[in-house]
């Protein structure tokens, strides 16, 4: 299952890419997470760098950056996560829509497991991820636009 969500934020792609990929400041705007860290001694994300994020629900996921193209896009894939998620990949996209206005987009692809229940569980997971993604984008917009107001 693949789903997308996006929002227009009053900032440049450079500013938004830097903020969203800065794990030292991630918890300042992301209401979904209670912890977020880069692994293996990495100080910044890049292709091959792994990250570990834990949601407020207590569920954690380790991901690996598979692309990193500032300030336009980056993508991760799950390397370890909850047993009920069979696969997960996500990307951020940053597109200028007007001077000082950027469309920030998320695209997620996920599949539940076990495979024989995937037909039932994947849409439920998709709904939860879509809801949380919408909240994340709204929180990012509020954080960025409050700081420039």
Image (spheres, rainbow, N blue to C red):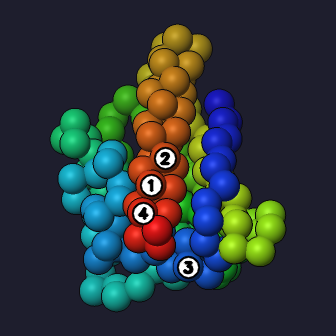
The answer to the question of whether label 2 and label 1 lie on touching residues, with beta carbons closer than 8 A, is yes
Numbered badge on residue 146? 4
Tell me the residue that label 1 is attached to: 142
Give how far across and how far down residue 56 sits, in percent.
22, 42
84 sits to left or right of 9: left
Between 129 and 83, the one lying in front of the other is 129
Quarter of the image with the N terminus in it: top right
Q: Which residue is mark 3?
A: 15
Label whose residue precedes the other's in the sequence (4 or 3): 3
Q: Residue at the location (61% across, 65% down)?
A: 10
Q: Earlier in the sequence, mark 2 or mark 4?
A: 2
Disc 2 from disc 4: Cα separation = 12 Å
In x, y percent, where is residue 38? Answer: 32, 74
Separation of marks 4 and 3 at Cα, in angstroms: 14 Å
Q: CA distance from mark 3 to mark 2?
A: 16 Å
Report the side of 137 relative to 22 (left or right).
right
> Is disc 3 in contact with disc 2, using a CB cutoff of under 8 Å?
no
Work out how far the residue at label 2 is from the one at label 1, CA to CA, in angstroms: 6 Å
């Amino acid at each position: 299952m693949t789903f997308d969500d996006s929002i227009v934020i009053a900032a440049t792609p450079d500013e938004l890419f830097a903020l969203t990929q800065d794990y030292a400041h991630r918890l300042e705007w992301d209401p979904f997470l209670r912890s977020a860290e880069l692994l293996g001694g990495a100080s910044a994300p890049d292709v091959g760098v792994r990250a570990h994020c834990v949601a407020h629900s207590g569920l954690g996921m380790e991901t690996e950056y598979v692309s990193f193209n500032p300030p336009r896009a980056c993508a991760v894939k799950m390397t370890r996560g909850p047993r009920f998620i069979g696969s997960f990949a996500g990307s951020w996209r940053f597109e200028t829509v007007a001077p000082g206005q950027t469309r920030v987009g998320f695209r997620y692809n996920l599949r539940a497991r076990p495979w024989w229940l995937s037909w039932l569980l994947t849409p439920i997971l998709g709904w939860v991820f879509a809801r949380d993604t919408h909240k994340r984008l709204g929180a990012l917009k509020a954080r960025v636009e409050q700081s420039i107001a």
